[in-house]
Every structure is written in C-alpha cells, then in structure tokens.
Image (cartoon, helix red, strand yellow):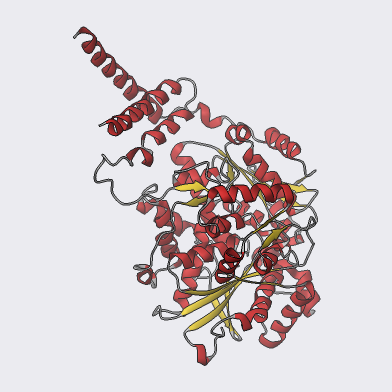
Amino acid sequence: SLPLAGTIAVRSLAVLIPVASTLFYPRSFATGLRLFNHPRLYTTSNVSNAGPRKMLFRSTRGNFLDMTFEEAVFEGLAPDGGLLVPHFIPDVSKEWRSWKDQAFHELAYSIASKFVGDEIPKEDLKALMEKSYKSFTHEDVVPVRTVGDLEIMELFHGPTFAFKDVALQALGNLFEYFLLRNNKRITVVGATSGDTGSAAIAGLSGKKNVECFILFPEGRVSPIQQLQMTSVLDDNVHCIAVQGTFDDCQTIVKNLFCDLNFKKTYSLGAVNSINFARIMFQITYYFYTYFKKFPDCDGTMSFSVPTGNYGDILAGYYAKRMGLPVQHLIVATNENDILNRFFSTGEYSTRGIVLQTSSPSMDIGISSNFERYLFYLFGLDNKRLSMEMKAFRDQGRLRVDEVQLKKAKFDFLAACCTEAQTKETIAKFHKEHNYMLDPHTACGVNAVHQLRHKMLPPCSNDANTAKHYMVVLATAHPAKFSSAVVAATGIEAEMPEGLARLAGSQVRFTVLAPKLETIKEFIKCTVPDPTGSRNVYTMKHYFGLVTGAAACVAVGVALGKNMKA
C-alpha cells in the first residue's frame, strides 16, 4: 500500500543519506541511524505487532515532537524555547506497591525505567543507579525524621549536602554513559542560585568528554556554596561569577541554548532542572519516603517543598500523577513570591527585581519549570502555552482564567515566608525540638503552619490522623547557611567533615558581566576542541559505510535490471 511504501522509502533514504555524508561529517551518521530507527516510522497502521507504547518526549511549545530519551537528555531546552516533557505520564497505579521493599537505587531504577524504556539495557541502568548513590553518607540516602508533628525528609546527605545531589549524581553518570557509548563530547552549561552549581560540579568533575561551565550571581550565594564550587580545580570545571542576579544567569543559559548554531557547534547540555532527567530522578524520593512511613501502603502523604525554580515540587506532581497517594503539595516560597502570587490571584508576573534573602537558592524571579506545569494546566494545548509564554516574555505577565485557577489551587497550596518568619521559624524549631533548620527548609515548615486551616482533613501526625503524614523537604544542610542559623539561634550548626575541610582551599573562578556575548566568548576561548567528536571515526562508522555501499550497489543492480527489461 502507499503508506507502507512511503515508510520503506523514507527508511531507505535514512540509510543512504548518512552513509554519503559520513565522508564529510561523521556525527551525521549517528543522526541518520536515529532517523532509521525512529519510532514515528513505525506508526503506520500497516505495520502490525508494533509492541508496547514507547516513551518519547516533546516540547511544551509544540514545534519539536518525538525525541528519544537520550535526545531529551542532551537537548536540555527545546529549540523552540520550550521545555521537554514526556508524551504521557506513566501510570504505575497497579505496580507501585510492589516497590515498597526496594532500596533507594533499586527504586530509582524502577521509576527511571518508565521513562528510559529500552534505550539503556536493563543491567546498565541498574548499575548506573547503584553507582549514583554510593557517595551518600546515610544508608537510606534520604532518611526521614519525625520532629514534633512533622516528618523531615533529609535530602542533604550527598556529596554537596543539598537535595540537588540526588538528581545530579545520576545525571552526571548518565551523561558519561551516553557520551562514551557514542564517542561524543558535551559542553554542559548551567546557572545556579547556590546548590545546583556545586552538585553539578560534584557530578561532572573529571568526567570524560565533558566540559562544565557554571554561572552563579556574584555576591548572592553563601560563602560555603561559592567555596564548594570554586575550590574544584579539575581542568573540565569552569566557574563564572556573573555580575548580576540568578535570573541574569538563567536568561543567559536559556539564550545560549536558543542559539542553535552555537548549541550545535559546542554540543551544549543542561544540568539545570530544564533537563527533564533531573525531574525524573527526583520523583524517586517521594515514593521512597512514602514507603518508609507506610510500609503497608495504607495511608496518604502531603509534602511541603521549599520552591524557587519549581523543579523539586514538579517531581512531586509527577509522582502524584503516576499514582502515589499524595493529599497536598505545598509550594513554599521566600519573599521572591511569584509562585505564591500566581496561586493566589491567577497572575504570573515579575516584579522586575529579585530580593536578596537568607535563602538564596530561592532568590528567583522567574521559575523556569513552571512552564511544564502550565502545559498540563492548559490541557496540553501547546499553541495556547506558546502564545502565553510569548506574552510573558514581552510584558512580564500572564493570567489564567477562573476555571484554570481553581484547578491550580486543587493541585497545589502555596504560602510565602518572609525574612522575619524564616528567622523566627529556625529559632522556634531549634528551641522546641533541638533540630536545626536551614533557611530554605524553614520556609517549608512555616508554610505548613500557615496553611493547616486550608487542609482537609486537617493534616498532622497525631493519633487522630494516623494514616496521614505531613512531610517537609529539608533541601540543604544548615551549616551551608551558618550566618542565617547563627542570627536566628545564636548557635553555629555542626559542620560536616565534607564542608569543614573546604576552609583555606585554593579557588578558581572568573568574574564576567551579565552579557550573552561575553559568556559566549569565554566558552569559545576555554573549550579546547568543540569539534572533537566530529573527527573521531569508530568501527560503527566504517561498518555503516561498508553496509551503505553494499546497499547502493544492490539498488544500482536492481535498477539496471529494470532498465534492461
């Protein structure tokens, strides 16, 4: 039939084109192989026994569809400026209870496999997950502690003592796995308000075929956060102190990815939560904490999440959509409250300034990952979302209607914690429970206290609500923010050995203006060989060339016979 003939024709071209272009540009061979095996070429109704539905990824703005998981990992930001999301959210409602006894790395595999599919062999993916969490100092990786009437999920037992380690240790190993498998290079560029940078560096330093550039706002991260980044002297790590805010850093990174020629030339990759793999890995600790508190899977759980760029709480939203019995998801902001204002009024608008607070990792004026949630809120309408994001870019605001605001309020509760409330919460929690909070986690605790009256049924961990737990995500070790802790309690937080040994370390970083071209030139001058992967021929290339040549000969012979006839 014609559709099937068209499919065969396209697949034939997908072999011939990369074979010919291999002579000039080896990387195009891999592109051709992806086209040859692309799932869309199997979607014709004339092809039977297509097998189970394959997970693919698309842009929230609609111009780029059907990316594989590997392509999504390396793409970071979609070429149309949108964020990549899975075609569907896996429904694990019939199997998630069977995961209850799994170790953290085993659970990470169970969840990741739903998005990765068969792109990574089962044993390889299991080994990657096991490797990713060996450096954590607690046997549970993310232990949960009962403190008063709350459960505190401690996400700071990784190499850099912040929640970003959970995703970025795994993402670093994932990058290295794909790069070595395909003999490619990558230039990772990331923006940080504090913790992402050090966690990304910890995950990527010394990795083969990786150059890592981290932009942070000069004077707007804590001294320990800066020291964690700038004391790593590996040749492939490059720290840039940008003379501006985190939003300036984030805008530069996004614009780098939107420059498609630059992105292609330097093989840019993302470590910020615009990279969906980070969200995927963070889903794990929502399930894991649930299993720790409900080994019989017979209760519900709510989570209060200190929120800046919206990635961490988005992982909780995915967990809920996948089937985890989540009652409430609380968006806890500091005085940079663009998200709290949205969930109160339906207007997502910037104020033009980013306030400097004691919780610098949340000092963000525009939450990048919020676009992913808007995509779902708008019913997967990428045209509507693209129009709204353009209006937001031009005017600094967008608004949803009453029906959508009601839906958003059903999905999330939100509260803003002021600087005074942050300080008071740290002091009170330490006095009453002898437990030290960092300022970000304090925002999460305070948000619970503000919102209890909106929660139905009332959410607490007392005997009357034994089948429900309220969990606050502790996103960083308090010692990383010693000035805020001392100001609130008069006591220094106990310094972990991994932080204490940073004192007096040699540092290396470059101070640059918040200008796109300035950062571009720095990358150009620093990356030793952006075209390294283009000039590496492997046995795969030679095999493909021989196979393609044979195919061309066969086609030529067939055509010749037809002409004679």
Q: Residue 60: tell me if it is visible.
A: no
Q: In terms of depth relative to the viewer, which is nearer, 365 or 347?
A: 347
Across the whole image, how many numbered discs are drawn on residues? Answer: 0
Q: Which residue is drawn at 37% across and 72% down?
A: 97
The residue lying furthest to the top in this view is 564
Position in image of residue 440 (x %, y %):
69, 69
The residue lying furthest to the left in this view is 565
Q: Residue at x 81, y 75 (%)?
A: 487
Q: Give the quadrant of residue 432.
A: bottom right
Q: Is residue 57 rendered to the left or right of residue 425?
A: left
Q: In terms of depth relative to the viewer, which is nearer, 466 or 143?
A: 466
Q: In the rendered view of the protein, which quadrant contains the N terminus?
A: top left
The residue lying furthest to the bottom in this view is 463
Image height of 352 relative to 175, above or below? below
Position in image of residue 364 (x %, y %):
71, 58
Q: Is residue 228 rendered to the left or right of residue 19?
A: right
Q: Give the quadrant of residue 44.
A: top left
Position in image of residue 361 (x %, y %):
70, 61
Q: Residue 144: tell me if it is visible.
A: yes
Image height of 267 relative to 541, above or below? below
Position in image of residue 281 (x %, y %):
50, 59
Image height of 29 relative to 362, above or below? above
Q: In the rendered view of the protein, which quadrant contains the C terminus?
A: top left
